[in-house]
Amino acid sequence: MSLEVRLYPDPVLRERAKPIEKINDEIRMLADAMIVTLVHAIGYGLAAPQVGVSKRLIVVDVNNKFYVLVNPEILTFSEEKQMGPEGCLSIPGPEADVERSQKIAVRALNLDGEEVYIEAEGMLARAFQHEVDHLNGILFIDHLGRAKRQLVLREFEKHLKEESEEAVS
């Protein structure tokens, strides 16, 4: 089952998501639905707030390897940074270059409640940073300067308008 992705400026996108106290069938079903949604949307990652659920759960797909992380926290950020394009399923259309740490270490729980530790670099590190930001109410546009952010939001509005015009035709 595919879920509806919430679009900017939905207030749930600005909330700090709540920790998941217990991993149960409801959380597993949410994770499965988020994976289906991510695959349909052809994205790299999805955080629960993006589907209207203010819980600390993310799914990431990089190089056809799926990660489902419950209560993820980034433990370390490398000093080495990388600039790279980012977009967002909640702000469809535009992309912008965002600076992120090249390497990070993440600790989380898997769906069996076991602690996992992942050292990630490159695209995987970028995706984890982007999705953990979502859990903290931070969007990629918050990493941009004012002028660039305004440009991205104008492109987003144009994209929404074009989509609605196509839907009517």
Image: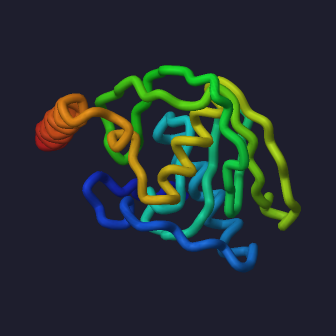
**Quadrant of res 156:** top left
Q: Position of residue 116 (x, y in %)?
A: 84, 52
The residue nearer to you, when weighing 11 against 149, is 149
For the N terminus, the quadrant is bottom right
* Position above or below: 142 against 65: below
**Quadrant of res 38:** top right
Question: Which residue does the image show at 37% across and 61% down from the upper left?
Answer: 14
Q: Is residue 157 left or right of residue 114?
A: left
Q: Is residue 99 left or right of residue 77?
A: left
The residue nearer to you, when weighing 144 against 39, is 144
Question: Which residue does the image show at 49% across and 70% down from the upper left?
Answer: 54
Question: Which residue does the image show at 15% across and 35% down from the upper left?
Answer: 154
Can you see residue 145?
Answer: yes
Q: Is residue 112 left or right of residue 73?
A: right
Q: Position of residue 108 (x, y in %)?
A: 76, 57
Q: How many marks?
A: 0
* Position above or below: 142 against 49: above
User: In the current view of this chain or complex, which residue is farthest to the front?
Assistant: 79
